Amino acid sequence: MNFIHNIQSVVLIGSGNVATHLAQALKQQNIAVVQVFSPNPAHAARLAHTIGTRAVSDINIIDRSADLYLISISDDQIENVSDLLPEIKGIVAHTSGITALEALNKHRNSGVFYPLQTFSKNRTVDLNTVPFCIEASDPETSEALTGLAKKLSSKVYPVSTEKRKQLHLAAVLVNNFPTYLYQKAMDLLNENDLDFDMLRPLITETGAKIMEMNPAAAQTGPARRGDQKTINIHKELLQHHPEILAVYELISNQIEKNE
Amino acid sequence: MNFIHNIQSVVLIGSGNVATHLAQALKQQNIAVVQVFSPNPAHAARLAHTIGTRAVSDINIIDRSADLYLISISDDQIENVSDLLPEIKGIVAHTSGITALEALNKHRNSGVFYPLQTFSKNRTVDLNTVPFCIEASDPETSEALTGLAKKLSSKVYPVSTEKRKQLHLAAVLVNNFPTYLYQKAMDLLNENDLDFDMLRPLITETGAKIMEMNPAAAQTGPARRGDQKTINIHKELLQHHPEILAVYELISNQIEKNE
């Protein structure tokens, strides 16, 4: 068998935010995105059009000569789509933080190509700073995927499925949960005719601080100080917001106990 | 009585992070910081030395001719120190997010001068982007404090005590609680020999997204998608971390219910 050392052509399987960002970055690096597959023809066509390539929505007529088949779809569909893929010579890899490498077991050379970042439509992300977590069925595949990742990013790490799951969980803690808290803060401010813009500089500085300091050292506020008087004022303000109050009490207690 | 329209001299009462940042910003604007008071002579001397002014630790010999006495100390000490201040002609204001204006009732012209930001030692903060919340006993004091704040920041808002408390609570939600979550994420990564640096680009992007998007629109992740399979994997990973698990379950449930 001829191993692929230098990935030069990619079939993208998926058309969501991650697929879109990767497609554009691959194109910029002159990696050929030869097809975009999605079972939804309109979705496939939209992304294919954006990057000037062909769309395909029948998995049986997928191009079989690409170096890499990059699966960037819902976690619960990855194994299913992998199994439906025809026999191909190229590498099959997914971009999921939580799905095991084993989901791609049907294929001889399989891997994981996980960019640890939050991607949204209409937001450009500088992939060069994004950590790429690589895992592979064999050393040659690992080398090929690592080489590709290094064209996109300066931060490429070998990460096992188990460690990748921990990273994915940690990403939920530092992205989804703060975003939830921002939303609750916005709700409180809107109810009081206050503009959420007033909090934006604080949110920026909170993130900037973490770039330089350990979180434990960066912590401030009433719970850290054990300032019960302030905590009680806050709880009173939340008396008609039982859902925020529950979060407030739980996290404040844990900060106080330094758990 | 002669009202103070243009604050040109300040006695700083306090020597902590907020006092230090304000002292430096006032000095830069050529506002005279005529004294720094702290009951702890070493603390008073340290900050006074930094900005080239005098330290005082006996409240009875405080300079009585300043335009503003700016109290920047622990919330539970503000009323006490205000009551101990001798009779002065200048304005007395505090910098607290949670303390009522009434804590300064002993003084004829009192106010609040609250910078909505997190301040740490050894970190420079660009005060120009920091929202200053102003409240005052009377329109002339409000005007004087607003004028001073506008020398330091482009974002100056009149905010009542009740609304300021809501802002302070919201600040805990968007600063202290995310910082707690960053700490828990770091703990998880360290246990798995993973570097917290891998999460830093995600934290930066999470904050950057909120500068442009509403939090509800920025939300992603398994709870938003109702992806129980991923949620269950995360819960399993947290089986030996009951404190993080409790937070995970509570917030995930609320995101799912879109509460």
Image (cartoon, coloured by chain):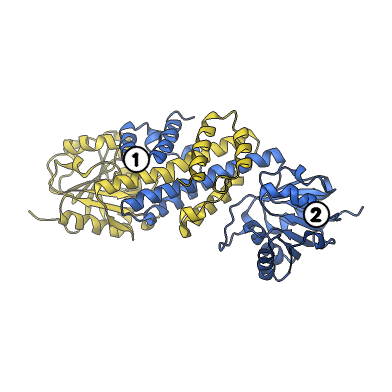
Chain colours: A yellow, B blue
The crowding category of the residue bearing disc 2, from other C-alpha atoms within 10 Å (few below 14, some 14 to 19, many at least 20), is: some
Instruction: Work out which quarter of the rendered image holds the C terminus of chain A and state it.
Output: top left
What count of labels does the image hold?
A: 2
Q: Chain of mark 1?
A: B
| Res A8 seen here | no
Front tag of 2 and 1: 2
Q: Which residue is mark 2?
A: B85
The quadrant where residue A98 appears: top left
Q: What kind of residue is marked 2?
A: Leu
Q: Is residue B141 left or right of residue A87?
A: right
Instruction: Tell me, yes or no, whether the two marked residues, 2 and 1, touch with CB atoms within 8 Å.
Output: no
Is residue B245 or residue A103 the one in the foreground?
A: B245
Is residue B149 or residue B196 the one in the foreground?
A: B196
Q: Which mark is residue B238?
A: 1
Is residue A237 or residue A8 the one in the foreground?
A: A237
Q: Residue B198 in the image: x percent, y percent?
A: 37, 54
Q: Residue B7 in the image: x percent, y percent?
A: 80, 59
Q: Residue A126 in the image: x percent, y percent?
A: 40, 55
In this rendering, is residue A213 above or below A245?
Answer: below
Q: Residue at x 62, y 33 (%)?
A: A236
Q: What kind of residue is marked 1?
A: Leu
Q: Residue at x 83, y 49 (%)?
A: B109
Q: CA distance from mark 2 to mark 1?
A: 53 Å
Q: Chain of mark 2?
A: B
Q: Is residue A191 left or right of residue B108?
A: left
The crowding category of the residue bearing disc 1, from other C-alpha atoms within 10 Å (few below 14, some 14 to 19, many at least 20), is: some
